[in-house]
Image (cartoon, rainbow, N blue to C red):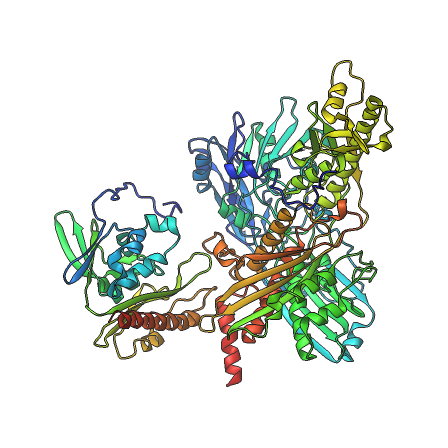
Amino acid sequence: MKLRIVRPSVLVDISRLELGGVRLDENELRVGALATWEELESAPELEWPPFAAIAECAAAIGDLQVRNRGTLGGSLAHADPASDMPAVALALGAQLVLRAAGAERALSAAELFLGPFTTALGPGELITEVVFPLVEGSGSAYAKVEHPASGFALAGAAAHVTAEGKQRVAVTGIGAHPFLLSADANPLDALEEAEIYGDRFAPAEYRRHLAGVVAHRALDRARERMDKAR
Amino acid sequence: MTESVIGVSRPRVDAHDKVTGATRYAADGQVHGLLHARLVLSTEAHALIRQVDRDAALAMPGVVAVLAAEDLPIAGSGSDRTTEPLARTEVVFAGQPVALVVAESEAAAEDAVEAVVVEYEPLPAVVDVEDAMLPGRALARVTHEGEDGGDLESIHASVDKGQEEGDDEQLSGNVLDTVHRSAGDAMALLEVSDAVVSGTFRTPWVYQAYIEPQVATAWLEPNGNLVVSTSTQGSFVTQRELARAFGLPLERIRVIAEPLGGAFGGKFALVEPLAAGATLALGRPVRVVFTRTDDFQATNPASAQVTHLRVGARKDGTLTAISGKMIVDRGSNAGWGVEGITSLLVAGPYRWEAHDIRGYGVQTNRFTFGAYRGPGAPTAAFALESLLDELAAALDLDPLELRLQNAVVEADVGVSGNPFPRMGAIEVLERIREHPLWQSRDSLPDGEGVGFAAGYWPGGTEPAAAVCRVNQDGTMTVVTSAVDMSGVNTGFAAIAAETFGLSPDQVRVVAADTATGPYSGASGGSKVTYTVGAAVLRAAEAAREKLLKAASEELEIAPADLEVVDGVVRAVGSPDHSITVAEISGKALRFGGSYEPIEGHGGSAQTRGAPSVAAHLAHVRVDKDTGEVTLLAHVIAQDVGRALNPALVEGQMRGGAAQGIGWALFEELVHDESGQLLTSSFLDYAIPLADRVPDIDALIVEVPAPDGPFGAKGIGEAPVIAAAPAIANAVAAAVGIRLRELPMTAPRVWAALSSQEESRT
């Protein structure tokens, strides 16, 4: 609206709905859609290796003013191709709770992103909650390289590793929307085939390389966290 | 005798008001009946204007007028930003102002801008500066209306222009100016030199990024006189430019320079013709405030430049010859360019046996080029200082010793043909040599490196005057019309206090305007302390003479036997025999008083500049995986003449170094092939934020300037110049790659590392 790209005729303020908070249940972590980055950054539940990527990612977003205002649900629904948290939601296999007038449904993060600023949210649908499954003994991390002006990810990667040796990596900033690398033995091979965006500042070839670098960094740190917690 | 106030750190006289928000800037003033203007900017880089359709905008609530070029009462026919503040028939860059929407509120004006429809007939956009020079190429401006650029050229390019071009190089009409500097047979000398290195260096358009965007407010006095209250670096030059634009006598124009929210060279009569033109057209007060996006697109950043350079030396490290071609992209600025100064500064503060340097000022369809802190200097130093490191490596010599061996001393004749005055090139290099960071450069972890580079700024001159006035209470008011861009008023207070015999907190400095103040010249060129400061010193001396004459009568002691200490005139050797300045002033400033007011007027007309040398030492870490360069530590040593106020001098050195770090690693205005600006906000245009600038170690070197007040000189521009090559040399030391293009962004560094890898395998 500030940039005059959209001019909605009606604006609904959802900021006073009670949709915040972080709650750790027996086998999942439930985060309200209005939880701010600042809340996530400092939530004690998110110091735990299975969810550490969430706090690490939140702390790397924008500046303090942005982190005090920006929310988890808002970021996912906006679907900026270079936003950070969608990668974490994908790597950790998050499920979204969507509400519309008189209806509720669940959607996996992997089904949400369709293109730049485009999601599978229907008209009148609101993300109310994001549910991260708990994998005991696992580790997670987020790594990125920022654009020096905007701070958006030139390439960002979230990684989740389990004690059984399973790993999931999702990347952001390099394509039409954040996406999961296939869960093969070496998920980085997927980058070779992926369609990568480039621009004058950071050509596609550089971003492809960078995605590999941050994916490795996130995987290493996730394993480190997992091993340390044992 | 109390201690000298010269050389003592004190807070800036304007610091409290600025920090507490009490300062009123040009956009803050309340003006009755004020209208607000917003710009309609060209969406084409090069086109003819077919039509400006204003009907829809005029129908919107609150809109008073939509003004195009023909609505402004412009007197001249020139095609510069003064005489063509709105494009007449041809737009020559994307972002050029085409119309002004004037409304009762800022919001109404902004809304209506989008309703103004401009019809263009596109022309080929000239964006490749080297290609544009070739004979037969399309021209960046097709409708030419000749008139010279007024006063602005002399401000910025106050160096000689070298020999006029005599030979018959074939060039297109886009080449507006050529400069050729030569002495000796540089080509022959390079042939026989023991080592010769060369390279082509590219630097981009760089934005001044002042905090306060361009703004001016204009109104008419009841008698029809024009008043302009503005954010400018010079009130008198703005007054002259407005007179030229509108054909008005000087006496009918009053320019008030308000406290400046940053300028760095970019605020010289760019916005005032718009505000004044609208006011003259409508008869009502008008304020023009550029939004940040307007400011990115429609102002006058530092020009891009391409430099081809070759340098040679003998086995023993003696520099032999330098030859080069320096191509300056002026954008649409037909009035002046930096080809003169950059072709001078590319020789650095070093002795050469021969030189052959050509400069070209070329028009393209990008921006209107303007001044930015050390115009033409950072790009010259980047080329030369990169090559000097390579030359030292080729000869297996220490790069710092190579510079020391060739550094100019007093009376050495430079590329300008004039002898250098006393300046501290050697002293500055020696300070860098002894720094622990330089000493430890060979014992760093993998991926880290230390580099250094030096550069100098010749220093400008302009006659200046000042008044020192003692008030009834014994305090002093210093009056100049200098714009305080960098803390100069605080320096004036120290100069006046020291000279007259007061403490600095008894001295106030006020900035007067063109109707009320003495002529002090514009703030730019690193000259204000050197020229206006000298005038303040003489004014304080003149006031002191009057004081002593009066005191002499009161005390019945000869003036020569009196001294003034902290506001008290006393007999030398007999301090009890005294009278205060306030008592004397009280006897003068009253009905029936007995003495002339204690006031002095002083002037200066410096005949030569006072060059300042600054050298930088940078410690970087290069991430070989991502190409990111992190600046771990940075040192600057500068010859400042005499630091009147060391805290302020260090502030200038650190600020200049930070902007130099911007040149090195971050800043670049980028156009696409059609001349559209891709970086028109701080989301795209990176500047060195606080978390990317290390705590800069500022080392003051004092080699007194022969003609400066207390040996002081202008120091604002020198510190920006050699930061980029120091960082480039540090990157080379860290990972063995030489970047020839600024800024050294992560993608560029990674690409260079990749091709280094390929050439190895």
Work out whether residue B740 can be spotted: no
Instruction: Reply above or below: B222 against B1.
Output: above
Q: Is residue B448 left or right of residue B269?
A: left
- Residue B668 rendering spot, x and y as whole percentages: 54, 59
Instruction: Reply above or below: B576 against A137.
Output: above
Instruction: Reply above or below: B712 against B560.
Output: below
Please name the residue shown 45% across and 68% down the image. Answer: A203
- Residue B351 rendering spot, x and y as whole percentages: 78, 67
Q: Is residue B349 left or right of residue B623?
A: right
Q: Is residue B191 left or right of residue B41?
A: right
- Residue A97 rendering spot, x and y as whole percentages: 18, 55
Q: Quadrant of the N terminus of chain A?
A: top left
Please name the residue shown 68% across and 57% down the image. Answer: B638
In which image quadrant can residue B408 be found? bottom right
Q: B206 or B408: which is nearer to us?
A: B408
Q: B365 or B225: which is nearer to us?
A: B225
Q: Residue furthest bottom?
A: B761
Q: B638 or B684: which is nearer to us?
A: B638
